[in-house]
Image (spheres, coloured by chain):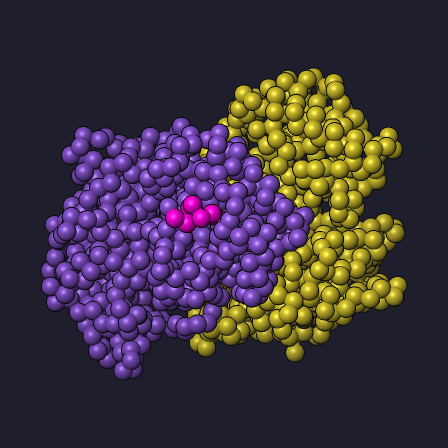
Chain colours: A yellow, B purple
């Protein structure tokens, strides 16, 4: 696979090392920086190689929730979070078809079970260690797991931690990265930007002893005396890989543009199996933000608004607008066997003037522009008919970029019926079609109920009888991908024989998530990343 | 990945060859035998290594349709099948989201386009060559492509060929394999049974020059002077691979039990990318036949009956019972975001005494037992309530084998409403929920309309008001898998640099299908297999 090229493993004989440290860490974001800091703490020398001209990767744009079962805040508040409950929740969500509460490993493979167990057993320890490094944290004591409403799980609130800023506000990905970069700089850990790792260097025994690096000043080789770590993210921005591994069913994603699957292909050339390559952290995207390569684009974590619905090209609702992003995206990929198409592939968020006034902002991927905000992704119309014409005109203009989707003639009439039906649900407080607003996470993601919303649900409000109406085009995308080589609980990459490849480690989206197709809850990238970077740093240094 | 083990590539230095030929062909089924025969025709020596104690692989159970665009029967009948129409149909079905009629390669990658083009350009030639070898063929002139009803395609009937028996009946997979085996034996081509290939042997330049083989008498090495061919099928029966590549969403399949992905893992260890590993030729299975490892089990290509419906555990229809098998299976995998489950994962075919009398038989995967047939997969009840109790009792007995699915209390009432609604559709002739019976392929697969069915559709008949009623449990499965290494139009396996791996060829389900997630039409394994075995044999021998 092309773009950009990676290399077959290179033999160490005759390699002149330009850089050298105990640990060479590829990727300067959460996984790489926390690994670097822990390793440095243990006395190891470290260098970090970052492909982009700046640090922070995808994390820079993250909300930065971190899923930490039995965290110290829970313990201090006397909230019980038993191991069996956490493992049950993980297994139930990761493997809904294979989960078996009566099985010793809950229906999981030993690999999956071991990683989940290590997460529970060491997450608190790792986050305490993160705080000891100098990163302040806070808890959202009310934050619910996405599926805490399932009767077969016991998922206490408060597993979600966030960075905490010195000014006592809640941190986010950007502030978290800034703090970690500060700590890395304070320890004089070298971070080389625009250093792209294109391959590994191995010794005669097959041990990974370094990497080959492309830099603005030519190629160099970097030696990792104890280990090479790949903390370099997924393959969201490799179109060919999306096509051959994700079925071409997502249009792109909001991962860092440097996430092109370099490590996946390096590992592939080493004969290392890649698993779960069809899985991703899915989220709907605002199509035009994606097409404009907006570097600040986020996935639509939460759909704003109460007098707002999302419809497909037939003018019908097809998702619970307030459901978690993974679930909303899966519904966008549903298949119509008769017409052999994905009828919800593009969807259209539609709102009225009232929602525009009450729910503007970009928080959690919100797409309703406030006064003065860029509104180029929004079309409008004074009537539903005019709105439909505006959407269709925009689709026509986008052409192949919108996969040649156009609105059929029935759209406006159908939309009118959909609005009437939704308005009835809003007045009655019960969404008979999609159960909007029934779970704790929907209520949390919606945020404060609008003051003028006196209807029973709070998350629904009838769309106005009169325009203006507004719309934006949504398409299925990723936060990042979930496939890659498997790693063990020490972060060691497992080869075809299921044994660790000596010297080779991976943390984060460059390795396979044991959660597979499932989406556990918010913070299920950062929580495990910070836990396993801690465990892996210890394993590699000691 | 385990079970059974494969090996890293072995260096040819010091290997003692036990067997030797120009071509070593792994797998004694349609792909292997046609490759062997063509190569022999060209003057090459050939040996065939088959893992099972008998030849025929999955093909032995196949219906043996073969999708052959612009075949000689069409030509002789004056039916036009233009290249642009065939390529458009292929592209539209293989890549519904990426298809672009205005694009030079129709929205396909060059790799995909080249393979589709080669299929159109050479299928007729390859099938004429097959006839010249001594295999008789016939056409089903009326057979429709599965999605010929789409307005944007022009898919003439008659692309489907079948083997033709000497007694003038239509052949099937078993008779086809028998004929090929006869031709192979007639040419004294050695076929070694119970010879499992566990790895490849490579020379110093990385050229594949042979294979390492496990036999009942110990290990041997077989040298392929010109080429090694893998014609060894997919990975349907490797549970771990199903889990890590197909998301654990199918329970098994009707491929030969020897299809355990050996070549996929051999290629993986060579650093060869595997693509479309999440794709499969999907078909619903009769769960209990699958659990009994019934060696004759077929996928349910066509659901028999008119007074028969398929419902999920909530007693509701969720599929068009007459749709092609791939489409029915996809609907079984749909996701309920609120309950975080696949509500259609197990489904229940339900029929009455009338259907039992009029639609018995195993043809095309039929599951209604005739008099004297094994009926152990069928439960019954004199009322819908009793039937529900019988189903639930069977589910209880199966336990984890039925993924712990049980019928909720609402099942019977819901089933009653479903039957009433379906009966109304049957009387009126229009299935307002799932459009049952509206496409040509549904009518073909249904077969002759029951004589006493005077209702407008012919494919629907009201279920009787009185029992007995019957049911069987359906689960999603595969015919076989679609992922693997990519090959070029000469059948050469492509390495990580997209260049052919010298000496290494693959044909059939051991390589990646360029059709990806799509299901083109009947015969879309055998049609390409026979075309590409012909092209690859020529490429390897010349």
Residue found farthest to the bottom:
B217
Counting from the top left corner in percent of width and height, residue A144 is at 77, 53
Q: Residue at x 85, y 64 (%)?
A: A79
Q: In this view, does A61 lie above or below B455?
A: below
Counting from the top left corner in percent of width and height, residue A6 is at 46, 56
- Describe residue A133's horizontal placement relative to residue A212 as left or right: right
Q: Residue at x 40, y 32 (%)?
A: B454
B355 magenta-colored:
yes
Residue numbers of the magenta segment: B350-357
- Describe residue B83's horizontal placement relative to residue B270 as left or right: left
Q: Residue at x 49, y 42 (%)?
A: B463
Counting from the top left corner in percent of width and height, residue A298 is at 67, 42
Q: Could you tell me if residue A497 is visible in this image?
A: yes
In depth, the one of A153 and B387 nearer the eye is B387
Dividing the picture into quarters, in which one does residue B23 lie? Answer: bottom left
B343 magenta-colored:
no
Magenta residues, dominant SS class = helix
Q: Could you tell me if residue A229 is visible in this image?
A: no
Q: Is residue B77 above or below residue A20?
A: above
- Describe residue A244's horizontal placement relative to residue B410 as left or right: left
């Amino acid at each position: 696979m092309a773009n950009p090229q990676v290399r077959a493993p290179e033999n160490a004989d005759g390699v002149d090392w330009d850089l050298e440290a105990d640990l060479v860490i590829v990727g300067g974001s959460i996984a790489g920086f926390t690994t670097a800091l822990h390793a440095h703490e243990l006395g190891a020398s470290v260098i970090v190689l970052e492909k982009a001209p700046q640090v922070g990767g995808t994390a820079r744009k993250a909300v930065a929730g971190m899923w930490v079962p039995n965290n110290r805040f829970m313990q201090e508040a006397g909230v019980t979070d038993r191991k069996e409950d956490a493992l049950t929740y993980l297994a139930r969500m990761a493997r809904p078809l294979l989960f078996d509460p009566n099985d010793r490993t809950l229906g999981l493979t030993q690999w999956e079970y071991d990683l989940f167990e290590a997460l529970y057993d060491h997450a608190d320890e790792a986050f305490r260690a993160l705080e000891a490094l100098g990163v302040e944290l806070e808890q959202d004591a009310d934050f619910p797991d996405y599926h805490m409403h399932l009767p077969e799980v016991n998922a206490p609130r408060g597993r979600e931690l966030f960075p905490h800023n010195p000014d006592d506000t809640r941190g986010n990905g950007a502030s978290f990265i800034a703090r970690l970069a500060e700590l890395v700089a304070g320890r004089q850990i070298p971070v080389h930007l625009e250093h792209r790792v294109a391959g590994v260097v191995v010794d005669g025994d097959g041990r990974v002893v370094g990497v080959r690096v492309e830099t603005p000043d030519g190629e160099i080789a970097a030696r990792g005396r104890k280990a090479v770590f790949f903390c370099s993210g997924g393959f969201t921005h490799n179109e060919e890989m999306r096509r051959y591994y994700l079925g071409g069913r997502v249009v792109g994603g909001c991962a860092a543009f440097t996430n092109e699957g370099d490590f996946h292909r390096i590992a592939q050339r080493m004969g290392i199996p890649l698993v779960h390559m069809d899985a991703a952290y899915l989220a709907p995207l605002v199509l035009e933000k994606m097409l404009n390569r907006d570097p600040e684009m986020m996935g639509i974590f939460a759909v704003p608004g109460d007098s707002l619905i999302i419809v497909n090209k037939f003018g019908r609702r097809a998702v619970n607008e307030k459901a978690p992003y993974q679930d909303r995206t899966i519904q966008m990929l549903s298949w119509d066997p008769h017409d052999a198409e994905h009828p919800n592939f593009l969807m259209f968020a539609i709102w009225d003037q009232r929602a525009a006034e009450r729910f503007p902002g970009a928080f959690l991927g919100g797409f309703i522009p406030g006064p003065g905000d860029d509104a180029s992704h929004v079309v409008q119309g004074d009537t539903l008919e005019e709105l439909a014409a505006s959407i269709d005109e925009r689709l026509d203009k986008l052409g192949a970029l919108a996969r040649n989707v156009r609105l059929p003639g029935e759209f406006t009439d159908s939309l009118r019926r959909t609005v009437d039906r939704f308005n009835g649900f809003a007045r009655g407080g019960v969404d008979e079609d999609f159960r909007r607003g029934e779970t704790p996470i929907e209520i949390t993601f919606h945020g404060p109920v609008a003051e003028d919303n006196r209807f029973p649900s709070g998350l629904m409000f009838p769309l106005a009888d009169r325009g203006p109406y507004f719309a934006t085009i949504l398409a299925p995308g990723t936060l990042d991908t979930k496939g890659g080589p498997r790693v063990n609980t020490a972060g060691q990459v497992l080869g075809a024989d299921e044994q660790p490849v000596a010297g080779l480690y991976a943390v984060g989206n460059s390795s396979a998530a044991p959660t597979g197709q499932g989406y556990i809850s918010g913070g299920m990238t950062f929580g495990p990343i910070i836990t396993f970077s801690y465990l892996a740093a210890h394993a590699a240094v000691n």
